[in-house]
Amino acid sequence: MRLNMYDLNKAEWSFFMNHEGYPEWRAKQVLDWLYKSRVTTFLEMKNLPNDLIITLKKRFEAMPLVVEKKQIAQDGTVKFLCKLGDGALIETVLLKHNYGFSVCVTSQVGCRIGCTFCASTMHGLQRNLSAGEMVAQVIIADKYLHQTSSQRVRSIVLMGSGEPFENYDESIKFVRMACAEEGLNIGQRRITVSTSGVVPGIFRFADEGWQVGLAISLHAPNDQLRSRLMPINRRYPLLDLLTACRYYCSKTKRRITFEYTLIQGENDKNEHAFQLADLIQGMNTYVNLIPLNSVAEKKYVCSSPDRFEKFLEILTSRRIRCTVRHRRGYEIDAACGQLRNKARM
Ligand code: SAH
């Protein structure tokens, strides 16, 4: 089987060149082509000798992703449906903010976490993505952005389908390649990893010794409700989760983001806002209130705007920093796995 050329980091490219009998500086040339010039074929690597190009073509798959479909929303959100080498389909989303563009990267094909409101999890987990398959998603989105508006991707969120901490090693390798100077070269503080609350993963992540951001999908302020919405809470209840979050904050001195999707009649009552404020009081946090994207097969609906206002008001009155995230790319199925689910039908 041919390797994915984005799967190799600097050390691995050096090892490859040594192993094949080439000087180590050839590794830097390949990396420059891949990440500075952003070429996606070996033939474009003009300063490499022909025999090396032949070896590379034999051993590596050039671009491991093919864009099957692209949907562009009015707010500037672009959703890519990508096909992997084995035919699996994943989604990558390019999001426009007032400070620039971010890419939402997928970490697994499907997911096994089983959050009851999420479309990604409906067909279970198919497989983990490799670090290179995650890098390739950024490359594809960035290339599109550069061609259409001469801009570059400014930040990355590992917040697409899948649970990054159930694919820990590849997700971390991806983040390291994303922030490496010789890689995608995006600052650590501009990368955020989102987890449903895999507690051992949070501790490990805090110990990586970096400034990469962490977001927690909280969605409920008490164990009973959270276990109903997110079965992972039965394995890692709130007390354990918040202990891990406090550890992350103290190790990194960074603020943690809590994501809270408002679901009508489920987690959007005033009492939930008060409970949430009590739960995270005193922590260095930031709460993102997110409109639920309705998934056809699920019974949940998004809370009304006045619920959002009330929630925001209660949290703010308790001095919790909080914003409402605008719904993005709604008309293009941009919510977690919906486009992929349609394509599977
Ligand atoms: N597994 C990770 C990252 C992927 S999900 C996590 O759980 O954080 C990315 C975010 O989208 C999570 O906050 C998730 O809870 C949220 N999400 C999933 N389905 C959604 C939906 N239908 N509407 C709004 N947010 C949703």
Image (spheres, rainbow, N blue to C red):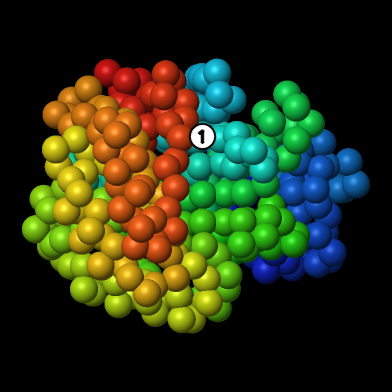
Residue 344 in percent (x, y) is at: 31, 23
> What residue is at 30 percent from the left and 77 percent from the top?
243
Disc 1: residue Cβ within 8 A of ligand 1's nearest atom: no
Q: How many marks?
A: 1
Considering the image in quadrants, where does the C terminus appear? top left
User: Is the residue 221 above or below the residue 24 in the image?
Assistant: above
Horizontal side of residue 104 vs 176, given as left or right: left
Residue 263 in percent (x, y) is at: 22, 38
Q: Which of the pair 114/98 is nearer the observer? A: 98
Horizontal side of residue 56 vs 74, given as left or right: right
Residue 153 sits in which quadrant? top right
Residue 15 sits in which quadrant? bottom right
Residue 325 in percent (x, y) is at: 44, 41
Q: Which of the pair 111/304 is nearer the observer? A: 304
> What residue is at 32 percent from the left and 20 percent from the top?
342
Q: Which of the pair 7/236 is nearer the observer? A: 236
Residue 340 in percent (x, y) is at: 36, 27
Residue that badge 1 annotates: 93
User: Is the residue 206 above or below the residue 5 in the image?
Assistant: below
> What residue is at 51 percent from the left and 62 percent from the top?
213
Q: Secondary structure at mark 1?
A: strand
User: Is the residue 69 above or below the residue 303 in the image?
Assistant: above
> What residue is at 44 percent from the left and 58 percent from the top?
321
Q: Work out which residue is located at the far right of the displayed protein and give it.
A: 47
Q: Is residue 193 visible?
A: yes
